[in-house]
């Protein structure tokens, strides 16, 4: 049972991505006690899995490191990883919340020496790299993980492998008897910053994701580009490990489609242009083709679009690709569709295809007393007539990192106002 002293002057922030971290910091630095909970073993969310931001193309670790330092330095913030909200009762100014903690099987004595991973022979799919490689079942979630502490996968806890890991640890940091636990807390207001998941591309049957190894998604491309990713930063084909020289980026893969996601996620166009820049930077002989319906690059981001268009080896084709088939002998991919500007039929061959899948909001799964508002697509809506719980970032609408920070700051202020009204 966790020892958490809270009152109805406290603020609960659910979700430890960029939005949740921002909301927690803003509220704490304004003088309020905050409890931050995150279901993953680390803070940073999907931002931690990015290679670079647009439009400056700088690594996300810069901003995350600053925020992690602020978190560690602020005594008003308590944070819990591998934690989920299981129940919310009460009303604005007086919420009763139950938090469930999943066992990490590694306690605070962990020094990240890595000896447990050295003796562990069992491997599991690496979720940080979207399953594109394997990792030890005793693992550090990623090189920049915060908190910097190992995790044991439940599959080895009751096995000989788990015992080997425990015996290898000279700091007595591995606790194979850890159990799921719960604790209750009080909160005056709640910020829901549950983030998003990429749309399941396997549902778009005509694109062959899951059947054709060389069809990947935009989030997977981020990990391919990363030096800490499955290919050490080289853009290689999953089927044979060969360099991808000719890459297609398909916009609106499942988005703006009544059969999948009816809405536009807004950032996919820019994400694909960013990834085309990765490709060109890493291999000057490579070429990228971006198939789009419309390009969404508003205000200051239009300069980024203009810059990418100036690269003669990046082509933009206005088309909704209708089908992808695979050459079984080579693993190459044949794209078919229509150029909607010229009316010409498209039959083009590529080494690798990257699907720009949209954002699906993570909805609240807890047992909640009272009304929570969601729109028809599952995004949190802030109803002025139902104050007390406030959405932030991509839980509220699809948006980029910078806008998430602004939105989370606004949500923290609303949470503070909820408390001040009581």
Image (cartoon, rainbow, N blue to C red):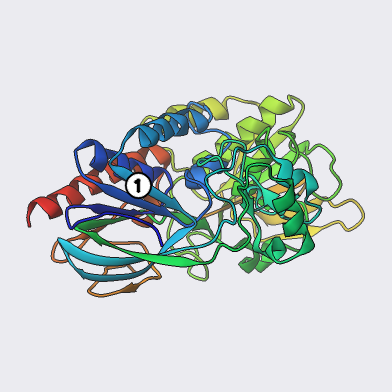
Q: Tell me which corner region of the image, top left, top right, bottom left or bottom right, holds residue 221.
A: top right
Residue at screen point 48% across, 27% down: 62
Residue at screen point 62% across, 25% down: 311
Residue at screen point 32% across, 62% down: 380
Q: Nearer the viewer, residue 200 or 82?
A: 82
Per the image, the residue denoted by label 1 is 78
Q: Secondary structure at mark 1?
A: strand
In the rendered image, which quarter contains the N terminus? bottom left
The vertical placement of 49 against 99, above or below, is above
Q: Is residue 275 left or right of residue 188?
A: right
Residue at screen point 51% across, 40% down: 146
Position of residue 375 measured from the top left corner of the image (x, y, whole percent): 32, 67
Q: Nearer the viewer, residue 9 or 255?
A: 9
Q: How many marks?
A: 1
Query: Which class describes the residues within 10 Å of circle 1: few (<14), some (14-19), or many (20+)?
Result: some
Furthest residue toward left: 421
Position of residue 327 measured from the top left corner of the image (x, y, whole percent): 86, 56
In the rendered image, which quarter contains the C terminus? bottom left
Position of residue 215 measured from the top left corner of the image (x, y, whole percent): 72, 53
Q: Is residue 385 left or right of residue 180?
A: left
Q: Nearer the viewer, residue 314 or 152?
A: 152
The vertical placement of 242 against 353, above or below, is above
Instruction: Using the rendered image of the protein, determine whether residue 208 is visible from the camera's viewpoint.
Output: no
Q: Nearer the viewer, residue 229 or 290?
A: 229
The vertical placement of 149 against 263, above or below, is above
Q: Is residue 304 left or right of residue 177?
A: left
Position of residue 412 measured from the top left corner of the image (x, y, whole percent): 24, 46
Instruction: Using the rendered image of the protein, determine whether residue 22 is visible from the camera's viewpoint.
Output: yes
Q: Is residue 212 left or right of residue 40?
A: right
């Amino acid at each position: 049972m966790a020892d958490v002293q809270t009152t109805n002057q406290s603020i609960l922030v659910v979700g430890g991505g960029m939005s949740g971290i921002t909301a927690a910091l803003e509220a704490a630095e304004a003088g309020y006690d905050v409890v931050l909970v995150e279901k993953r073993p680390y803070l940073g969310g999907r931002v931690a899995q990015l290679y670079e931001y647009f439009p400056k193309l700088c690594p996300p670790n810069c901003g995350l490191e600053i925020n992690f330092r602020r978190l560690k330095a602020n005594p008003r913030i308590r944070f819990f990883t591998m934690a989920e909200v299981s129940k919310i009762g009460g009303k604005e100014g007086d919420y009763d919340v139950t938090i469930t903690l999943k066992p990490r099987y590694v306690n605070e004595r962990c020094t990240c020496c890595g000896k447990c991973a050295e003796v562990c022979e069992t491997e599991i799919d690496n979720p940080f790299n979207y399953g594109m490689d394997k990792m030890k079942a005793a693992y550090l979630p990623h090189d920049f993980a915060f908190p910097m502490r190992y995790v044991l996968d439940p599959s080895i806890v009751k096995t000989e492998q788990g015992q080997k890991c425990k015996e290898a640890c000279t700091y007595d940091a591995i606790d194979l008897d850890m159990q799921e636990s719960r604790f209750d807390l009080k909160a005056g207001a709640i910020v829901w910053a549950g983030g998003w998941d990429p749309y399941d591309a396997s549902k778009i049957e005509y694109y062959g994701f899951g059947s054709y190894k060389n069809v990947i998604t935009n989030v997977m491309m981020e990990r391919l580009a990363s030096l800490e990713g499955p290919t050490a930063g080289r853009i290689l084909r999953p089927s044979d490990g060969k360099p991808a020289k000719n890459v297609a980026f398909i916009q609106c893969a499942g988005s703006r489609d009544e059969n999948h996601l009816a809405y536009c996620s807004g950032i996919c166009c820019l994400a694909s242009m960013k990834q085309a820049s990765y490709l060109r930077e890493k291999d000057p002989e490579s070429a990228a083709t971006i198939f789009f319906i419309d390009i969404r690059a508003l205000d200051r981001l239009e300069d980024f679009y203009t810059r990418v268009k100036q690269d003669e080896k990046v082509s933009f084709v206005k088309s909704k690709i209708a089908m992808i088939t695979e050459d079984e002998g080579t693993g190459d991919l044949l794209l078919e569709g229509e150029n909607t500007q010229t009316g010409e039929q498209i039959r083009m061959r590529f080494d690798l295809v990257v699907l720009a899948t949209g954002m699906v909001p993570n909805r609240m799964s807890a047992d909640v007393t009272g009304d929570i508002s969601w729109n028809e697509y599952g995004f949190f809506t802030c109803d002025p007539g139902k104050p007390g719980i406030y959405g932030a970032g991509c839980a509220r609408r699809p948006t980029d990192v910078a806008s998430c920070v602004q939105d989370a700051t606004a949500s923290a202020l609303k949470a503070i106002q909820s408390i001040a009204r009581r």
